Image (tube, rainbow, N blue to C red):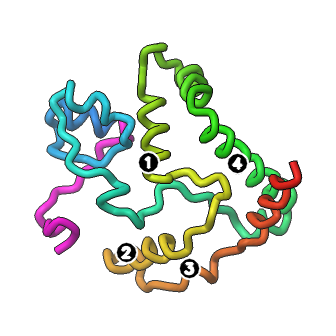
Amino acid sequence: MRWGGLDPSEVTFANAGGGGDRFRAVVAGVVDATATSSEFEPEAAERGVNVIARAPEATPNLLRICVVTSDKVIAEKHDQLVRFLAAQMAGHKYAIENPKETADYAREVAKLPPDDKSPEFIFEEVVKYDAVKPDLPIMADKLQWNVDMMHRNGRIKESYDIKTFIDEGPRQEALKLVATN
């Protein structure tokens, strides 16, 4: 048994494409349920679709966003990596501190109509669930939960200590770079 008492053997899994494709498949009755991005939640009710779970509540330890790189990049492109991380930190901080500008820019980039409120919905969700942290903390406990879950579900043969894969150096340097600007 898994979360909610549902045994995975009772479910038929099917590839139904990306988030938008999966949402449309539920609306069309092609599939009974799916996981998809919360960006579709505002239109779910008007399309006759019910949201039955929200990922941050149902699986609070599941990481949705993670920045990863290789030892080779850390060694050979160290300065660029640090500047990239610093730019991400500064950008996230700016976006969180400027919600209207962030929503307006999202509408512009995504070519959304001016009355589309999905950027505000996503922004509010990010804030509600503390989903974006400008200092880009490495959440080793959540990463370890993901590794252990993959092992429990047979996706990997054995679990391992995630801390052996973490290099805090570039992030710490990026924090210092952001603090000096």
Q: Local crowd at mark 4 within 10 Å, few (<14), some, or many (≥20)?
A: some
Give the Cα separation between the discs numbered 1 and 3: 28 Å
Q: Amino acid at mark 1?
A: Lys
Closer to viewer: mark 1 or mark 4: 1
Where does label 1 land, which residue?
128
Q: Quadrant of residue 104?
A: top right
SS for callout 1: helix
- Residue 7 shown in magenta: yes
Cα separation between marks 2 and 1: 25 Å
Q: Earlier in the sequence, mark 1 or mark 3?
A: 1
Tell me if mark 1 has few (under 14), some (14-19) or many (20+) residues whose alpha carbon lies within 10 angstroms of its own. Answer: few
Look at the image and tell me in which quarter the N terminus lies. Answer: bottom left
Q: Amino acid at mark 2?
A: Met
Q: Earlier in the sequence, mark 2 or mark 4?
A: 4
* Residue pictured at 46% horizontal, 14% vertical: 113
Mark 2, mark 4: which one is toward the viewer? 4
Identity of the residue furthest to the front in this view: 97
Q: Which residues are magenta?
A: 1-20
Q: Give the label on residue 88, or none.
A: 4
Residue contact between numbered discs 1 and 4, judged by CB atoms under 8 Å? no
Q: Magenta region, mostly helix, strand or loop?
A: loop
Above/below status of 128 relative to 75: above
> Which residue is label 3 attached to?
162
| Relative image position of residue 57 (x, y in whole percent) | 32, 58
For residue 55: magenta? no
Q: Earlier in the sequence, mark 3 or mark 2?
A: 2
| Secondary structure state at the residue bearing disc 2 | helix
Residue at image x 78%, y 71%?
169
The three-letter amino acid code for the residue at tag 3 is: Ile
Disc 2 target residue: 149
Q: CA distance from mark 2 to mark 4?
A: 29 Å
